[in-house]
Image (cartoon, coloured by chain):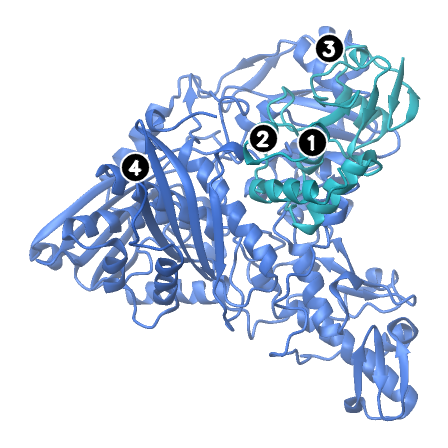
Chain colours: A cyan, B blue
């Protein structure tokens, strides 16, 4: 089957029910998207499918169809993604960094839908993404910073 | 006995606080021929300078978010007079001979000791390079070495306006004598003390950072694994056919206590594993948490080995105006790092190569060599970033498991644990119980403090030479009397190991976490009995003019201690000295229909010189939230010999929506750096429990908080 990821079409040889996460990571080789729980409880595997944030660990690759898949490796090519990544660096969000790809993809989706979220909106959008290093206060601050930057 | 007390204190001084005067931890000059070949100038196992001028520092620690790569780059940059961004960092392979922690004497990342171990040795490693480059330049120019300085990656002789780049000098410098004990800066720091950007941030933001999970090798395959769900059980049998019928599955591997399904990608391997029904036998099939709690309770009644003692406790109790007694219970905890355990291994032609993120890569190498019947030199361990360690990766049994699977696979294989496996096969923080008895005078001041610590003997096998002495686990009993001066004191230790097969280990905050909860909540109960404010009560018992006293006063000020609070809210305080630092926290909680909501946390830390204040803040913020999860939720339980919890739905963690407002204050200090990775975690539970006590008048002696008081998110 064909899969369009970050603007490039890949010919994929896998079972149709293989979660998109493993197709991205093991077959295509885009390892920025992470595995955390396997059941959509932690958000580490978040990517955009057709512009929407999706948990790739439970999304069968066959369900993607001809929608565009966008991952952490290419989100910086969008104005929102770039603003979010810049804010992440400015606020010094990351510690271990493992969950941050998912956090950034989730935040970029939030800011695309709502360019000026308040704390409540941020909490609602981001609370499906777990960080065990406890970077939540900085993620919140970075989302505000990215929103303020106006690039979104 | 006094000697033991001294030993303990000297351990604290050497291992947890001091670094000055330590032997240089990283080999200089000799023994590095193999490494030397890679760069024009390699004065020691840490530093390399290429003829292109590139400066590379080999980080002898794991990077699991604590900022080791950044602080090592900063220490090197300080002595070489360059910006930290000019120092490229690479993670050291598993090699105890070259990269042993100067105090822990092994390549271990734990105990919040990375920076403390590096503070002098890494700067000396860089200083030797500085001296050798200056010497090379001075000889070329026929000038005095003492007249040369470093600036912007060059050696400069100002008087003759000559300069040469590090790259141009690298080869000549490599031929200079290696200084035995190079002097390092004692002040006037340009890099140390600044919030230089983390060197690992950019790659972690654009997805290019490589964790163990991200290793890719030509021809590699992927494995999903399940070990016996019954603790200590064995694999009785398994029909591999349903797995082999799954597209992409290539092989089923069995181990004595586990089964692994191998496939072309992890998705196939996981689907294959889900398709089979392994049969298990034996193990602790009737074990329950209630059994383990009863056993720990029974241990509370036994007399333990004396950890430390002072004065005459029995006499003080006999003459006491009143006494206080309480038993404490702390549950089993999982680490629940975001990156599930994973390890890539290739076994070929009598050699084994491993790609992994480990807190003990040198030990993993030895363990794998032993398991495979190979020599240590035939095992190579390549280090990768770790997506959260918290102590779990101080064990290497999972690396051995991956190696045993790989032995049966004719390709490099990446073994990836599911979240369920990561939760159910953890090396848990074990049940910890305590019994505290306090003798009080007529004013309610303690005249004797008696703390019985019931804990597993982890240090007997983990670090016996440093932290196991005369039948006492020096970690479990560390900080068991807090920072206070009690006229009469007894801490004894009753060893309480888990049943064979149940793996336990170190968990972020270690002994300080268990003892901080006990000691600091006792203090608030004593203060309440005496009718004295908790801050004022603590002040009576702290050494005057001490760092911890200064910290307490600062914390009271920063948190607005004593100022009016909104209705329904209360504050709780806790302080602790540990990991070479001093830490305090005021937690503000709101009681809402019987539920505890933590609204605000004000933390103050005295960690000596804050090498990178931003990283210190990160570690405190993160440590606090890690401890908050444990305080509110964490409780790993066993039923019918199986761990009940499996994933984040039944082993919940703090999320953004229940993250309180956090303020971190760093006390300005000229003391040597202390650890910052664990103090934040250790301080949370007592501050929150004390706030709940202040709000309700009801002391709590168990963790986590009763489920009835906690809102699930």
Q: Quadrant of the N terminus of chain B?
A: bottom left
Q: Nearer the viewer, mark 4 or mark 3?
A: 4
Host chain of mark 3: B
Residue drawn at point x = 82 percent, y = 67 percent: B42
Q: In terms of sequence position, does the residue under pointer 4 or pointer 3 come before the other?
A: 3
| Callouts 4 and 2 in the same chain | no
Choose top left, top right, bottom left or bottom right for residue B104.
bottom right
The residue pinned by badge 2 equals A121
| Up-down relation of residue B149 to residue B329 (above or below) | below
- Give the percent coordinates (x, y) of residue B408: 76, 25
Could you tell me which secondary element the residue under label 4 belongs to? loop
Host chain of mark 4: B
The residue pinned by badge 3 equals B243
Could you tell me which secondary element the residue under label 3 belongs to? helix
Q: Residues within 10 Å of mark 1 (few under 14, many from 20)?
A: many
As measured in the structure, the alpha-carbon distance from the residue carrying label 4 to the one carrying label 2 is 26 Å
Q: Nearer the viewer, mark 1 or mark 2?
A: 2
Could you tell me which secondary element the residue under label 2 belongs to? helix
The residue pinned by badge 4 equals B568
Q: Which mark is residue B261?
A: none
């Amino acid at each position: 089957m064909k899969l369009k990821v970050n603007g490039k079409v890949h010919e994929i040889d896998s079972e149709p029910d293989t979660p998109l996460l493993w197709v991205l990571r093991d077959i295509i080789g885009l390892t920025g998207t992470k595995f955390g729980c396997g059941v959509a409880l932690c958000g580490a595997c978040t990517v955009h499918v057709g512009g929407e944030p999706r948990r790739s660990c439970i999304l069968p690759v066959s369900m993607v169809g001809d929608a565009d898949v966008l991952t952490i490796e290419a989100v910086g090519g969008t104005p929102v993604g770039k603003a979010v990544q810049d804010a992440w660096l400015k606020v010094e969000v990351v510690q271990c960094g493992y969950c941050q790809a998912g956090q950034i993809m989730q935040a970029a989706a939030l800011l695309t839908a709502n360019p000026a979220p308040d704390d409540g909106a941020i909490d609602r959008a981001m609370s499906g993404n777990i960080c065990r290093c406890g970077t939540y206060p900085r993620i919140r601050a970075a989302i505000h910073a990215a929103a303020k930057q106006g690039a979104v | 006995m006094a000697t033991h007390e001294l030993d303990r204190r000297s351990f604290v001084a050497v291992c947890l606080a001091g670094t000055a005067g330590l032997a240089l931890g990283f080999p200089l000059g000799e023994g590095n021929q193999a490494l030397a070949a890679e760069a024009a100038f390699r004065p020691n196992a840490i530093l390399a300078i290429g003829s292109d001028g590139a400066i590379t520092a080999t980080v002898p620690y794991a990077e699991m978010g604590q900022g080791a790569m950044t602080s090592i780059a900063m220490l090197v940059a300080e002595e070489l007079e360059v910006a930290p961004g000019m120092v490229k960092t690479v993670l050291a392979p598993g090699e105890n001979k070259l990269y042993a922690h100067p105090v822990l004497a092994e390549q271990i990342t734990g105990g919040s000791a990375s920076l403390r171990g590096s503070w002098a040795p890494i700067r000396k490693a860089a200083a030797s390079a500085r001296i050798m480059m200056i010497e090379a330049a001075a000889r070329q120019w026929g000038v005095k070495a003492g007249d040369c300085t470093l600036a912007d990656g060059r050696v400069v002789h100002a008087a003759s306006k000559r300069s040469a780049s590090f790259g141009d000098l690298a080869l000549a410098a490599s031929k200079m004598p290696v200084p035995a004990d190079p002097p390092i800066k004692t002040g006037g720091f340009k890099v140390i003390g600044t919030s230089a950007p983390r060197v690992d941030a950019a790659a972690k933001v654009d997805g290019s950072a490589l964790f163990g999970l991200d290793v890719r090798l030509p021809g590699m395959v992927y494995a999903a694994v399940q070990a016996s769900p019954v603790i200590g059980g064995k694999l009785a049998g398994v029909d591999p056919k349903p797995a082999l019928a799954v597209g992409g599955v290539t092989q089923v591997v069995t181990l004595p206590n586990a089964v692994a399904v191998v496939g072309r990608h992890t998705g196939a391997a996981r689907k294959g594993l889900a398709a089979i029904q392994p049969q298990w036998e034996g193990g602790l099939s009737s074990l329950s948490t209630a059994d383990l709690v009863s056993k720990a309770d029974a241990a509370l009644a036994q007399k333990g080995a004396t950890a430390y003692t002072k004065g005459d406790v029995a006499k003080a109790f006999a003459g006491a105006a009143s006494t206080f007694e309480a038993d404490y219970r702390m549950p089993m905890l999982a680490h629940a790092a975001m990156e599930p355990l994973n390890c890539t291994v290739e076994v070929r032609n009598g050699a084994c190569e491993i790609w992994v993120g480990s807190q003990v890569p040198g030990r993993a190498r030895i363990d794998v060599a032993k398991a495979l019947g190979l020599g240590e030199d035939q095992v190579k361990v390549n280090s990768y970033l770790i997506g959260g360690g918290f102590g779990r990766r101080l064990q290497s049994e999972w690396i051995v498991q991956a190696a045993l699977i790989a032995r049966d696979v004719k390709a490099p294989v990446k073994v990836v644990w599911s979240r369920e496996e990561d939760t159910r096969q953890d090396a848990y923080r074990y049940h910890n119980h305590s019994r505290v008895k306090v003798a009080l005078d007529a004013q309610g001041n303690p005249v004797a403090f008696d703390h019985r610590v019931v804990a597993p003997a982890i240090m007997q096998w983990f670090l016996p030479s440093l932290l196991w002495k005369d039948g006492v686990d020096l970690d479990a009993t560390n900080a068991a009397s807090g920072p206070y001066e009690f006229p009469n004191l007894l801490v004894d230790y009753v060893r309480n190991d888990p049943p064979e097969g149940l793996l336990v280990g170190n968990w972020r905050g270690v002994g300080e976490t268990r003892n901080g909860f006990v000691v600091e909540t006792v203090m608030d109960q004593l203060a309440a009995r005496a009718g004295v404010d908790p801050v004022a009560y603590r002040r009576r018992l702290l050494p005057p003019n001490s760092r911890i006293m200064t910290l307490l006063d600062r914390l009271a000020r920063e948190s607005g201690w004593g100022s009016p609070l909104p209705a329904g809210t209360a504050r709780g305080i806790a302080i602790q000295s540990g990991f070479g630092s001093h830490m305090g926290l005021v937690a503000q909680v709101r009681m809402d229909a019987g539920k505890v909501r933590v609204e605000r946390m004000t933390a103050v830390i005295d960690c000596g010189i804050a090498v990178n204040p931003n990283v210190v803040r990160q570690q405190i913020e993160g440590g606090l939230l890690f401890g908050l999860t444990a305080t509110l939720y964490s409780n790993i339980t066993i039923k019918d010999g199986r761990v009940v919890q499996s994933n984040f739905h039944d082993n919940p963690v703090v999320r953004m929506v229940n993250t309180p407002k956090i303020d971190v204050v760093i006390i300005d200090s000229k003391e040597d750096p202390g650890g910052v990775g664990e103090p934040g975690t250790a301080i949370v539970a007592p501050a929150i429990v004390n706030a709940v006590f202040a709000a309700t008048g009801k002391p709590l002696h168990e963790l986590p908080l009763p489920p009835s008081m906690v809102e699930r998110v």
